[in-house]
Amino acid sequence: MDRMPPVPEKDALPADPPRVNDYDLLAEAYTAENEDSLINAYYARPAILALAGDVAGRRILDAGCGSGPLFAALRDRGAIVTGFDSSTGMLEQARRRLGDGADLQVAALGRPLPFPDGAFDDVIAALVLHYLEDWGPALAELRRVLKPGGRLIASVDHPFAIHGIQRQAGRKTDYFATYNWTEDWIMGGQTVPMSFWNRPLHAMTDAFTAAGFRISVISEPHPVPEARELFPEQLAATPSFLCFLFFVLQAG
């Protein structure tokens, strides 16, 4: 059979558009960019670890573990850690960081998780819930895998910060509404559209209590002190800022 002639370049099919929230595509660049960044390394991760406190011997689930920086920090503090993520690319980065012996699984927040009831003392859900429109199924599963009295330690985009960003961009958003917003992330020469859901504080607390959690702590922390020496220009103008909101919740 004769080969078909090549399609002229002008008639070539367009490339597939990038997938929304495609962490597989961003995995290597995202891991490198956020390893020592102000927001991640000197603000978000230290805040979670401070809220977790002494974790030696505790069974902890790192929900949406990404490339594993919190997993590593918790393990270094003596915790027995399991992690899951929906991105195989991010889990590959985590495996490089943590070694082949790390308990890492592919799973998606908001769907049934491959763990028995009451398997964990704590669940860490750092910067993952704001990808979901409906928190109900995700919180129900996280509650299920926690032992009675266990803790869910979570962080999300600060709703007032996102509201301000949207207003500065000329978008007439309603703080009291739950709405979707998007932006493009450019990392490692790749552009990926990212999609998030913003909701007011009362909608968050309502979702937590409806899922059977009691709110112990709501925190708006500062960067750690050494950040001022490492990022003097960034922090000179705004030494304090709203970025994420942190919660400690107790399973009833």
Image: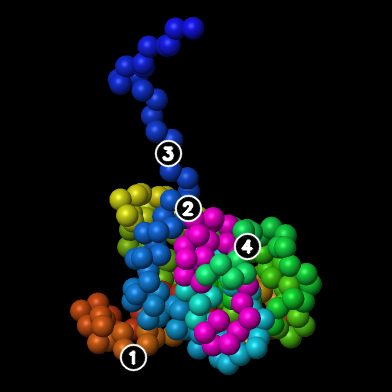
Where is residue 105? Give x, y as percent.
Answer: 63, 62
The residue tagged 3 is 17
The mark found on residue 176 in the picture is none
Q: Which amino acid is tagged 3?
A: Pro
The residue tagged 4 is 105
Quarter of the figure with residue 146? bottom right
Which quadrant would the C terminus be assigned to in this image? bottom right
Q: Is residue 91 magenta?
A: yes
Q: Which amino acid is tagged 2?
A: Asp
User: In the image, is residue 50 above or below residue 130?
Assistant: below
Check disc 1 and report its element: helix, strand or loop: loop
Q: In whole angstroms, how far apart are the C-alphas of marks 2 and 3?
A: 14 Å
Check disc 2 and report its element: helix, strand or loop: helix
The residue tagged 2 is 24
What's the magenta region? 75-98
User: In the image, is residue 161 above or below residue 5?
Assistant: below
Q: Which amino acid is tagged 1?
A: Pro
Mark 2 and mark 3 lie on one chain; the one further toward the N terminus is: 3
Question: Are circles 2 and 1 on residues that touch, CB within 8 Å?
Answer: no
Quarter of the figure with residue 40? bottom left
Mark 2 and mark 1 lie on one chain; the one further toward the N terminus is: 2
Question: Are circles 4 and 1 on residues that touch, CB within 8 Å?
Answer: no
Check disc 3 and report its element: helix, strand or loop: loop
Q: Residue at x 61, y 90 (%)?
A: 56
The answer to whether residue 78 shows anywhere in this view is yes
Where is residue 41? Give x, y as percent.
Answer: 39, 78
Q: In whole angstroms, how far apart are the C-alphas of marks 3 and 4?
A: 28 Å
Q: Which amino acid is tagged 4?
A: Gln
Residue at the limit of the structure toward the left, as seen here = 233
